[in-house]
């Protein structure tokens, strides 16, 4: 029995993780479920998986969860991250996942994470702990699997694929009027709202390049992105002799999730296998850096390091929420991110308090700038 904790259990990755756990009930015991708020979904999960602990960030009403111990607040995170649990799965969306990631890694626990924002924001202060991480982000899981079969000195490049998002073929001049609904209509992946908007701006690919830099300790000049609309190849490793190793599977997050859950073993997980003939062709295109400026802006912020990747991540999350609420336009996201990055003069973070100070200061700056 593997004892697991699922942080962000009611979100897209959290629910898909529980889908797999449900299939392999006799191999996993869910010791903790964590969510930002109480919901019907969480209640059902508690009933089905009977965790010993439930963490709820916003615990503001009388909640009846019989037979489970309720946790909340910073102390709750510090407590659960010290528990004797075989694998923590971080399926939290956005910067909310930073403190749980920090505590789990600090306590030297095994972490499988889809929470790229936390990896990026903690990269400067915690990167020596990143070898404990099993990536769930599909591209990074693919590359992780390929790197396990490769000698580090043989690698000349890693290539991350992108579907291109819903606006891959959309005229640039019409981007200023796209609606929230259009931006949420992702052609390949069904995901949470934040990452879906990031996929429409290609910010997600920029964040993934920074994520890869920290996770795999690889220089930025050796990481590139390529548009691959079929989303069948998730990651490619290029070797010094020109050989390419690629990782292919159908577009389903349960592949990287199950890889992390069963690591280092593999299981038949009941997803229809890829039919290459039915698929027919795989296409690749250069990203349109003019149409999607955030791809370059984000990688530049990554290269600068220090507080920049944090400012980038925080600004993006803030602005994506504003866009989702109908308060700013689609193009305002990149406009304000660039503006914020240009006006930053924060010192390099040295510890977790510094990281949270950068977050707070960036949010204050955004309040002033955007409202
Ligand atoms: Mn991804």
Image (spheres, grey):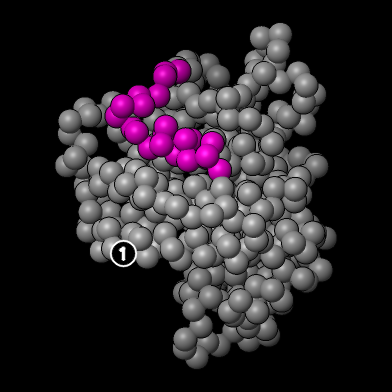
Residue range in magenta is: 284-305
Figure quadrant of residue 362: bottom left
* Residue for badge 1: 367
Q: How crowded is mark 1: few (under 14 residues within 10 Å), some or many (20 or more)?
A: few
Locate the N terminus and report the quarter of the image it occupies. bottom right
Q: Count every numbered label the image shows and give the total.
A: 1
Relative to 361, does residue 287 appear above or below in the rendering?
Answer: above
Figure quadrant of residue 51: bottom right
Q: Nearer the viewer, residue 355 or 202?
A: 355
Q: Which of 80 and 356 is in front in this view?
A: 356
Label 1, secondary structure: give it: helix
Residue found 32% across the figure and 47% down from its top: 339
Left or right of 345? Residue 214 is right
Residue found 51% across the figure and 47% down from its top: 309
Whether residue 97 is visible to the viewer of this picture, yes or no, is: no
Residue found 63% across the figure and 49% down from its top: 124
């Amino acid at each position: 029995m593997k004892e697991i904790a699922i942080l962000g259990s009611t979100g897209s990755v959290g629910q898909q993780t529980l889908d797999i756990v449900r299939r392999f009930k006799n191999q996993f015991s869910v010791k903790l479920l964590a969510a930002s708020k109480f919901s019907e979904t969480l209640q059902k999960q508690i009933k089905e998986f009977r965790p010993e602990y439930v963490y709820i960030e916003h615990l503001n009403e009388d909640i009846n969860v019989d037979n489970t111990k309720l946790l909340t607040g910073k102390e709750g995170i510090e407590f659960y991250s010290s528990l004797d649990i075989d694998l923590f799965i971080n399926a939290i969306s956005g910067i909310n996942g930073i403190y749980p990631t920090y505590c789990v890694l600090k306590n030297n626990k095994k972490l499988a994470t889809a929470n790229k924002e936390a990896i990026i924001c903690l990269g400067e202060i915690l990167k020596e702990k990143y070898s404990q991480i099993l990536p769930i982000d599909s591209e990074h899981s693919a590359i992780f699997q390929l790197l396990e079969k490769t000698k580090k000195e043989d690698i000349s490049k890693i290539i991350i694929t992108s579907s291109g998002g819903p606006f891959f073929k959309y005229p640039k001049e019409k981007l200023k009027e796209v609606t929230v609904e259009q931006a949420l209509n992702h052609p390949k992946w069904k995901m949470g709202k934040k990452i879906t908007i990031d996929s429409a701006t290609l910010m997600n690919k920029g964040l993934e390049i920074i994520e890869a830099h920290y996770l795999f300790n690889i220089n930025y000049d050796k990481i590139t992105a390529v548009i691959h609309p079929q989303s069948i190849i998730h990651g490619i490793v290029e070797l010094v002799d020109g050989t390419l190793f690629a990782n292919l599977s159908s577009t389903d997050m349960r592949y990287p999730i199950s890889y992390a859950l069963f690591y280092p073993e593999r299981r038949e997980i009941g997803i229809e296998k890829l039919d290459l003939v039915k698929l027919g062709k795989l296409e690749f295109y250069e990203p349109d850096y003019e149409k999607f400026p955030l791809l370059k802006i984000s990688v530049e912020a990554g290269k600068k390091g220090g507080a920049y990747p944090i400012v980038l991540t925080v600004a993006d999350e803030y602005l994506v929420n504003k866009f989702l609420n109908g308060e700013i336009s689609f193009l305002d996201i990149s406009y304000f991110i660039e503006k914020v990055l240009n006006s930053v003069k924060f010192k390099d973070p040295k510890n977790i308090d510094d990281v949270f100070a950068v977050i707070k200061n960036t949010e204050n700056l955004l309040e002033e700038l955007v409202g």
